[in-house]
Amino acid sequence: MSLLELIQETVKTVGSDKVNLTGEDLSGKELSKFNLKKANLTRVDFQNATLKEINLNEATLEWTNFAKADLTDADLSKAKMYRANLEDANLENCNLSEAYLGKANLRRVSLKNADLSKAKFHYADLRDANLEDANIQGIDLRWSRYNSKTVWPNEKFDPSLTGAILYERE
């Protein structure tokens, strides 16, 4: 039985909130539509994984690697994503409402049409990120970094007025 089958069976048996995959290597795996709500996924490697429509609502995703992963239509609402690496990931149409992304790496991430309402991006790196048509109602951008290539939902929006820091260096 593959690891993915074991994960699915464990979720069915005990519930996703009891699943602990800390440190697992799931890079390049296909986990679309998986339900891992409230699971502990600390330090899991999801690099290059396909995670379309995955349910990670209220999951613990601290230090988790999502580099180049496809999270289109994923539910990450209320997820704890401290120091998560989302560099070059696709989070289009994603639900990140009320998520915590403190010190997360969001360089070159696509957040088009994402729901970022009430999300906290303290010290997050948003350089070269695309937030086109994203819902940023109530977003907390204090101490986050952005650059002139960061695309905001509204061209008249000034992130510096929210406490974000313009940072042009590499």
Image (cartoon, rainbow, N blue to C red):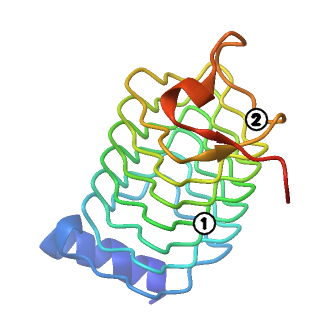
- Drawn side of residue 160 relative to residue 117, left or right: right
- Going by the picture, which residue comes out furthest to the left? 14
Q: Position of residue 133 (x, y in %)?
A: 63, 18
> Residue 9 versus residue 27: which sits nearer the camera?
27
- Of badges 1 and 2, nearer the viewer stands 2
Q: Position of residue 124 (x, y in %)?
A: 56, 53
Q: Position of residue 121 (x, y in %)?
A: 47, 46
Q: Crowding near pointer 2: few (<14 within 10 Å), some, many (20+)?
A: some
- Disc 1 secondary structure class: loop
Q: Which residue is rendered at x = 52% and y = 61% of the image?
A: 103
Q: Which residue is rendered at x = 33% and y = 67% of the image?
A: 60
Q: Is residue 129 above or below residue 31?
A: above
Q: Is residue 169 above or below residue 135?
A: below
Report which residue position mark 1 lands on: 85
Kindly indicate the quadrant of the structure image that contains residue 104.
Answer: bottom right
Kindly indicate the quadrant of the structure image that contains residue 34.
Answer: bottom left
Report which residue position mark 2 lands on: 150
Q: Amino acid at mark 1?
A: Asn
Q: Which residue is rendered at x = 43% and y = 64% of the image?
A: 82
Q: Amino acid at mark 2?
A: Thr
Which quadrant of the rendered structure holds the N terminus?
bottom left
Q: Crowding near pointer 1: few (<14 within 10 Å), some, many (20+)?
A: many
Which quadrant of the rendered structure holds the C terminus?
bottom right
Image marks 1 and 2: residues in contact by CB distance under 8 Å: no
- Drawn side of residue 156 relative to residue 77, left or right: right
> Residue 19 versus residue 118: which sits nearer the camera?
118
Count the numbered circles shown: 2
Instruction: Give me the C-alpha separation between circle 1 and circle 2.
Output: 17 Å
Q: Is residue 12 above or below residue 109?
A: below
**N-terminal-most mark, 1 or 2:** 1
